[in-house]
């Protein structure tokens, strides 16, 4: 067994015809068959090999091998965005009349898909407080096919015990698929499959690629399910295929994931401690702080506490907006996990699909600011935040 850092560099066994060190970008939409018989055998999945770019591509396959290894799954499928990974997975694993149990704190578009769109297709989603065992047990029934969570959750960094959630769901019905969005951690910090989850989804737009220059997603799990998602969720239902150029950049980004994550985590911890002492801050949410309600679980299931910090500015939305509008090094933009620090206001941006009441129920107050701590010098970032707070 090799270490994560080694696997991030040597996870793919792909060798091209010329011995290139780096997997080339195979910009081919289709692949040649030697004969009609061979084409038929490939379509019937009786012979391995490429068919058409919507079903697979060598540049993507090399990245998928690396991602499966890093998440500790049998197989991976890369997609055109995180929402591509999430929707292709859900469409494959659910039918009309069946149900999903989901945590009530989710990325805004995942929430919107679950709350407003799946219902149009006869799929019911129960939103619960996943950290409350009693609520989970009460929501499970014979129609439940999926239990879905994010941990740390976007945007308030709530921590859910993956192992306990998977145990409860599987004890009720081993066929239930526990799906964990691991975007905020990356596999360097947390491996949901090793804790009992069945599938892991990611917005690779974030830490996995890490440089804020592309959209991508990935889903990792057992080979049979990943093959179904490839042939149903991607090939037929969404077409959310990752382009080979993007796969190349994503694979390049993954090589430095461990070093980037170490720096994101160390800087986020320093900034969280600074915010904790700031008298203009009502509350700080960072799983590394002893004051975080999920701190002990985070210590158990995460290697370190991540690069995301959220905080409530005293005085609500208006004062929070002054901080977000006044920073000079941090950039006011949605997204996260990039080299550069990004700051945003979830209630009016990433989580605007939630109504006022839903925001409150999900623990997303109007004064909450979400900070994706980048790779700048952390003391420069603290000075930047300090001058922004002085404007409040
Ligand atoms: C936790 C989480 N999951 C999924 C997504 C969707 O990813 P993408 O924007 O790559 O479609 C995001 C995007 O911000 C996210 O934060």
Image (cartoon, rainbow, N blue to C red):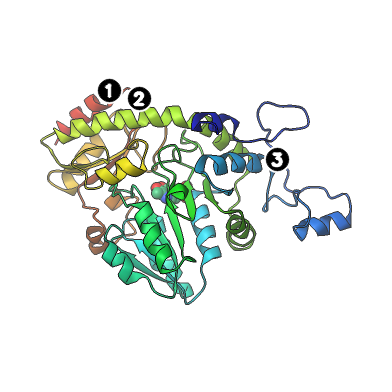
Numbered tag placed on residue 380 in the rendering: 1
Q: Residue visible at 65% across and 28% down?
A: 22
Crowding near the residue tagged with mark 1, few <14, some 14–19, many ≥20 C-alpha atoms within 10 Å = few
Numbered tag placed on residue 287 in the rendering: none
Percent x, y of residue 18: 77, 28
In the picture as drawn, the residue positioned furthest to the left comes out as: 279
Percent x, y of residue 105: 31, 56
Give whichever of discs 2 and 3 has the lower sequence position: 3
Q: Residue visible at 31% across and 71% down?
A: 138
Residue 107 visible? The answer is: no
Nearer the observer, 190 or 195: 195
Q: Residue visible at 21% across and 47% down?
A: 293
Tell me the SS state at disc 2. Answer: loop
Where does label 3 land, which residue? 27
Percent x, y of residue 94: 51, 68
In the picture, measured across the screen, residue 264 lies left or right of residue 250, that is: left
In the picture, measured across the screen, residue 342 lies left or right of residue 278, that is: right
Tell me the SS state at disc 3. Answer: loop
Cα–Cα gap, marks 1 and 2: 7 Å
Give whichever of discs 3 and 1 has the lower sequence position: 3
Locate the N terminus by quadrant.
Answer: top right
In the picture, measured across the screen, residue 162 lies left or right of residue 364, that is: right
Percent x, y of residue 363: 23, 55
Q: Is residue 360 above or below residue 124?
A: above
Cα–Cα gap, marks 3 and 1: 42 Å
Cα–Cα gap, marks 2 and 3: 35 Å
Query: Is the CB of the residue bearing disc 1 within 8 angstroms of ligand 1?
Result: no
Proximity of marks 2 and 3: CB atoms separated by less than 8 Å: no
Nearer the observer, 212 or 36: 36
Numbered tag placed on residue 376 in the rendering: 2
Locate the C terminus by quadrant.
Answer: top left
């Amino acid at each position: 067994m090799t270490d994560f850092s080694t696997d991030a560099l040597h996870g793919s066994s792909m060798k091209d015809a010329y011995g290139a060190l780096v997997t080339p970008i195979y910009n081919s939409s289709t692949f040649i068959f030697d004969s009609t018989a061979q084409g038929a055998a490939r379509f019937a999945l009786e012979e391995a090999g490429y068919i058409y770019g919507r079903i697979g591509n060598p540049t993507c396959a090399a990245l998928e091998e690396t991602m499966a290894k890093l998440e500790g799954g049998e197989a991976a499928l890369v997609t055109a965005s995180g929402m591509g990974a999430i929707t292709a997975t859900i469409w494959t694993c659910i039918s009309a009349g069946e149900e999903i149990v989901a945590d009530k704190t989710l990325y805004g578009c995942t929430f919107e898909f679950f709350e407003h769109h799946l219902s149009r297709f006869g799929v019911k989603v129960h939103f619960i407080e996943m950290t409350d065992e009693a609520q989970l047990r009460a929501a499970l029934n014979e129609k439940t096919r999926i239990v879905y969570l994010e941990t740390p959750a976007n945007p308030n960094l709530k921590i859910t015990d993956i192992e306990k959630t998977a145990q409860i769901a599987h004890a009720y019905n081993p066929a239930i698929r526990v799906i964990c969005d691991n975007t905020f951690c990356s596999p360097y910090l947390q491996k949901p499959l090793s804790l009992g989850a069945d599938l892991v989804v990611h917005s690779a737009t974030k830490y996995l690629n890490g440089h804020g220059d592309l959209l991508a997603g990935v889903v990792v799990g057992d080979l049979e399910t990943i093959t179904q998602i490839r042939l149903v969720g991607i090939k037929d239902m969404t077409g959310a295929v990752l382009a080979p150029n993007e796969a190349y950049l994503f694979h390049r980004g993954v090589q430095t994931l461990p070093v980037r994550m170490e720096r994101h985590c160390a800087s986020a911890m320093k900034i969280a401690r600074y915010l904790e002492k700031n008298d203009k801050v009502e509350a700080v949410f960072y799983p590394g702080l002893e004051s975080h309600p999920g701190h002990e679980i985070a210590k158990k299931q995460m290697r370190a506490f991540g690069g995301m910090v959220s905080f409530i500015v005293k005085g609500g939305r208006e004062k929070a907006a002054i901080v977000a509008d006044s920073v000079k090094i941090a950039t006011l933009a949605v997204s996260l996990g990039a080299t550069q620090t990004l700051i945003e206001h979830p209630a009016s941006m990433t989580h605007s699909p939630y109504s006022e009441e839903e925001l409150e129920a999900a623990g997303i107050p109007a004064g909450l600011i979400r900070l994706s701590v980048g790779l700048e010098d952390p003391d420069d970032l603290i000075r930047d935040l300090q001058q922004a707070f002085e404007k409040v």
